[in-house]
Image (cartoon, helix red, strand yellow):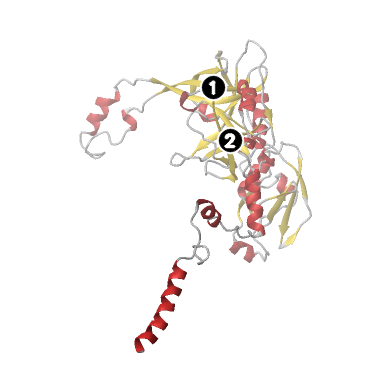
Amino acid sequence: MNRSFALLIIVPLLIAMVSLGCKRPDEAGVSDKSPAKAEQSEKPAAPQEEPSDAGAVKETVRDIRTHEFPSFADLVENLKPSVVNISTTSVVKPKGFRERQPRSPYGENDPFEEFFRKFFEGAPQHEYKRQGLGSGFIISEDGYVVTNYHVVEKAVDISVILENGDKYEGKVIGKDPKTDLAVVKFEPKGKLQAVSFGNSDDLRIGDWVLAIGNPFGLGYTVTAGIVSAKGRSLGLGAYDDFIQTDASLNPGNSGGPLFNLNGEVVGVNTAIVAQGQGIGFAIPIKMAEFVIGQLKGGGKVVRGWLGVYVQELTPEIASGLNLKEDAGVLVSDVTPGSPADKAGIMRGDVVVEFEGKKVDDVSDLTTMAAVAEPGTQVNIKFIHDGKPKDVARLRTRGSGPAI
């Protein structure tokens, strides 16, 4: 009886287990692995909604297409005839033995010093020629060209080579070491295509610029970049006010033009950092134009002169003068009888504006005063005894030892 009772319990359990095992997979809750359903089950989840700022940035990037970046081909084609290559020959005289110290290998106190001096004093001195390369640009259809002073500084022969290969003999009309600018003249066979000047003051950091020149003798090389900075001082002189660009400049680019995208010259390529890449400097055309006009017209430059000696205004000096900020430059001395003296500017005053433009440092005032035509009236705002003074109106004169 016990056996019968056990069978009554076990048999129904076995039947239930068998029936469950025979059910179709979908009925048992197991997912179907057929290809169609697998694809359906593997569909990615809907992306999460992006933040509004991220979405705007993504939309902006999507709108920038590569074909919208500028091509300079047509612009370069129009500008190349206005650019020239310059080849120079200079005569170099090696230093004589008399200039080399010491003459005796044992120093000046050697008893045989007189013997060495007489022995080498009559040694022949050999001169040798050195070739130089540079660039330039045409400023008038009758053959006036602008380049750097250091390109033609010691040249005895100058060749100006046009884009079509025509070669002419050039002559220096005027040069200005202080701004490293020079004007060369040659006699062309016909009318030339001159450049147009832009306004370098309108340049903004990030603007596109083009350089065309003769780097390493590779004529009419074109490089492009942006304005990296403005108002750079390199310690080369009183009129340092360079445009910095990452357009590639190399030896031979000196004197060549820096163009904006309107095809206007905005700078004269002048200097590079030998240890770096993508760091070149150009003279702003706003300053260069003043110098070029005087060199072309008279062969020399006469700058505006105020008759003041100035120095940087440090926070300590500003505090001692009871000034609220260290803006402007301090007048350290005034030349008696100078335009500044006649206008009432005194030692200890602080110049803060020149012709409506803010003066931040000595370089600013030096540059602004230099491009003021002698004899013209200029307006200067300054601070006297800690109080702003009315604008002083004065007439500049020719160049003097001070600003």
Q: CA distance from mark 1 to mark 2?
A: 21 Å
Quadrant (top left/top right/bottom left/bottom right) for the C terminus: top right
Which percent across, then down, holds residue 263? 66, 30
Looking at the image, can residue 299 be seen? no
Q: Is residue 19 left or right of residue 335?
A: left
| Location of residue 330 in the rendering, given as x and y in whole percent from the top left corner | 64, 55
For numbered disc 2, what is the local secondary structure?
loop
The residue indicated by pointer 1 is 85
Query: Which quarter of the rendering shows the N terminus?
Result: bottom left
Nearer to me, 400 or 137: 137
Which amino acid lies under the numbered mark 1 shown in the image of this protein?
A: Asn
Q: Is residue 292 above or below residue 365?
A: above
Q: Residues within 10 Å of mark 2 (few under 14, many from 20)?
A: many
User: Residue 99 has which mark?
Assistant: none
Secondary structure beneath label 1: strand
* Among numbered discs 1 and 2, the one appearing first in the sequence: 1
Name the residue furthest top. Answer: 189
Q: Position of residue 217 (x, y in %)?
A: 47, 23
Task: Choose between 180 and 1: the one closer to the eye.
Answer: 1
- Residue 339 appears in the picture as rendered: yes
Q: Residue 210 or 373: which is nearer the viewer? A: 210
Q: Residue at x 69, y 36 (%)?
A: 199
Q: Label 2 is placed on what type of residue?
A: Thr
Question: Which quadrant of the figure has residue 93?
Answer: top left
Query: Percent x, y for residue 125?
Result: 34, 21
Q: Which residue is mark 2?
A: 179
Q: Residue at x 39, y 87 (%)?
A: 5
The mark lying in front, picked from 1 and 2, is 1
